[in-house]
Amino acid sequence: MTITIAAPAPASLAAPRVPPDRILLLLAPAVAILIFLFLVPLVLFFVRSFTEFDGTTADFIDQAWDLLLSQAFLTALATTNWIALIVTATVLLVSYPIAYYLTTGTGSGVRIVLLSIVLPYFTSIIVRTFSWMVLLGEHGLVNDTLLAAGVIAGPLPLMYNRLGVLIGMSYVLLPYMVLTLYAAMRAIDPSLLRAAAGLGASGFYTFRRVYFPLSLHGVLSGAMIVYILSIGFFITPALMGGQHDVMIAMLIDRSLEVAVDWPAAALMSLVLLLVTLALYAVYYRLTDIRRLIGAR
Amino acid sequence: MGREPRQGQFDLVEMDSVLAAPSPAAAMPPAAPTAPIPAGAGRGAIELRGLTKRYGDETVVDAVAAAIAPGEFFSLLGPSGSGKTTTLMMIAGFVRPDGGAILVDGEDMTAVPPQKRGFGMVFQNYAIFPHLNVFENIAFPLRARRWAKDAIEERVGWALELVRLGRFAGRDVRQLSGGQQQRVALARAIVFHPPVVLMDEPLGALDKNLRFEMQVEIKEIQQRLGMTMLYVTHDQEEAMSMSDRIAILNRGRIDQVGLPGDVYERPANPFVGRFLGEANLIEGIVIGQSGELVRLRLASGQELRVPRSAGAVTGSGLLFIRPERVEIASGTSVPADPGANTLVGTVRRCSLLGNILRYAVDIDGMPPITVDLQNAAGVAPLPNGAAVVLRWRVADSLILAGET
C-alpha cells in the first residue's frame, strides 16, 4: 500500500508585498518626471496661449467656436480619425497572422521575424519615413522596378497622397500591434486548443470560438494603442502626405509655425488631448473587461 | 446563459432519474445522433496494434498492443515517463505514431485527425474554456457538431444533472472549485455520448478525499452510460479501484495486462509487483522442485517454498509476497508447517500509517521484510528488537525471475 499525495500546489513565487509607504518612494522618480517634463509644460502652454489672447472672454469664446467649427479644422478632424481608423484596421489585419506565427512557430524563422519587427522600433521614425520615400517616390525603387519590368507605363502615385500616409503610418505602428497581440496570444493555454479539437471542433471553429475570443483583449488593446498614436501623428503624414491629407497635428503645427496663432494651436491641442483621453478611458474600460472575458 | 434551476431539482438527485437520457422525442433533431446509451450498440471497441513513438533516439512507446472491449474501463498505469500519456495522445490523435495502428470498432483511426475521432476527452488540467460559462463549456462539443438549440439545451441540462452541477449552468467557470471544474470537464466529455472517453490523469490536481469521491462518480457514470473508458493514471489505487482491466506500462512497454486483482496478486515481474504496492521480493537460488513447489535457498541458508510458475525460473529467483499476507508473532520457535513458510527475525521498526502498522523485520543476511498488520482493536505494536516469527502461506507467494 502506498500513500498517494495529490500534486502539490505550486508555491507562490510572488515577491513579498512592498509596504505602501515604500511604494510612494519607488514611484517618486516617475512621478517627478511626469510632473516636470509633461504636466507642467502642458499646463504652461495652455495658460500662456490663452492669456496671450487680446480681447474679452466673449470674444474668445466666439473665436474659439469659429475655429472649432471651421471647415479646415473639421476636415482635419475627420481626416485624422479616418486615417487612424484605416491604419488601425490595416495594421491589425497584417499583425494578427504575424503574431500568430510568432506564438506558434518554431525555429530560427520566429527569431528573424521577431527581430525584423522589433529592430525598426528602435530606429528613428524620421529615418524610417525617409526610407519609405526612397522606396515609394516617383523614381523610387518600387516604381523603377515596375517600370523596368513593364508592368506599368508611367510611375504610380504612391506618395504625397493618402496612400503614402497609410503605408508609412501602418509600417511605423506595426510593432505596437504585433507585440501587443503576441503578448495576448502567448497567454492562451495551448491545451485549450487541443481540448477543442479533441471534443470535435474543426480548426476554424476552434479559432472562432476559442482562440479569437481569448486573443480579443489583445486585439482591443493593440487597436486602441495604434488608434491613439495615429490621431497624434505628425512627421509621417507631413512628409508622405499630399495637400489633402492635413491631420490635426499638422494643423496645430501650422498655427504655431506659420500663423503664429498660439491660442488656436492650444485650442486644437486641447481637443486632440480630450479625444485621446476619451479613447484612453474606453481602453481602460476594455482592459477591465478583458479580465471579465477570461484573459489572465 | 443563466438558467435558473427548475422546480424540484436538488443538488443530490436520485441517480436513476438523472442518468436516464432525455427521451429522444423530446428534443432531438432528426440530424443529431440520438443514441441515448452509446454502448448499448456495442460500440467503442479499441484495438492498439504495435503502437510506437520515438523522439530522437528514444523510443517512448514501444509496440504497445491491447484489445479493449466496448464498455470496458481500461487503465494505462505507469510511473511518469513510462509512455502512458504519449500512448493516450496517440489514441486521441494529437501525437502521430511512428508505427502501429489504432482501430476503433474495426475502423483504422491512425490517420484520422483528432476532431474526427469522436472521442470524449478529459485533460489533466481540465482545459476548461475560461471565457465560456459552465453551460457553454459543456455545450461546446454539441455546438461544434451543429446541434439545434433545443437539443443542446436539453442535453446540456441532462449532463449538468448527471455531474450534479444543475444549478451552476450560468456560473463563471473560474469561480468553481477544483472538483466542480473537474465535473464540468467530465460533463463536456460525455455530453455528446461518445462511445469512447479518454482521460489523462483527470484527478491529479485534487486532494485525496475529493479524488476518492470523483473516482466513485466517474466509475458510476461510466457504468451507467456503458462507454469505453481509457484512463491514464500513475496512481495504482485509483487504477485498481476503478478499472475492469489495467495495463501496466514500464519504459514504453506494457509489462502486464489483467484484472486489478490478478495484476496485484500475480505480477508478471518485480517491477509490476513493486509498482502496484508494497512488495517483498526475497532473493534466493532455485535448488530444485518437488511436485508443484519450487525450493528456494536464501543467502542465509534457509529454504523457502513457492508454487511453481508457468514460466520456469532457474538459477536465481525472487520470492514475491505482499506485506499484508505475512503474519507476525512474537517468539523464536518455528513449528513445522507444510503449507507455510516461516522465518525468524527481529523487529527493526514499526510505523503507524493510520489503518495499518508497518513492520520492518530484520532476517539474517538479507534486506528487511515488510509486514503490514491491520491497526485493529487490541493490536499493540511490538517493540523494536523484539524477536518475531514471520509466517505466510506458500500459496500466497510467487516466484519471479530476477530483474535483468
Image (cartoon, rainbow, N blue to C red):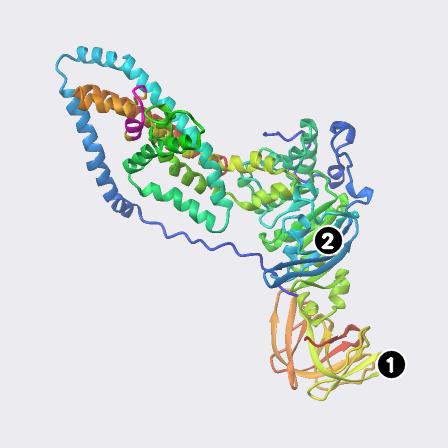
Residue A267, x across and y down, in percent: 23, 20
Q: Mark 1 Cα within 10 Å, few/some/many (few <14, many 20+)?
A: few
Foreground residue, A183 or A89? A89
Residue A10, x across and y down, in percent: 49, 54
Q: Are marks 1 and 2 in contact (CB under 8 Å)?
A: no
Examine the rendered structure and indicate whether residue B235 appears above or below residue B40. Answer: below
- State left or right for residue B25 relative to residue A192: right
Give the amino acid type for the residue marked by disc 1 in the picture: Gly
Q: Is residue A223 visible?
A: no
Give residue B259's mark: none
First in sequence: mark 1 vs mark 2: 2
Q: Is residue A241 visible?
A: yes
Name the residue beneath numbered marker 1. B291
Name the residue beneath numbered marker 2. B101
Tell me the mark number nearer the camera, choosing from 1 and 2. 2
Residue A77, x across and y down, in percent: 32, 19
Which residue is at 70% across, 84% downward?
Answer: B344
Count of residue discs: 2
Instruction: Give the chain letter at badge 2.
Output: B
First to last magenta residue range: A236-244
Residue B210, x across and y down, in percent: 62, 51
Foreground residue, B236 or B359? B236
Examine the rendered structure and indicate whether residue A88 appears above or below residue B334. Answer: above
Same chain for mark 1 and mark 2? The answer is yes
**Which of the 4 image quadrants contains residue A65?**
top left
Examine the rendered structure and indicate whether residue B368 appears above or below residue B275. Answer: below
Give the amino acid type for the residue marked by disc 2 in the picture: Ala
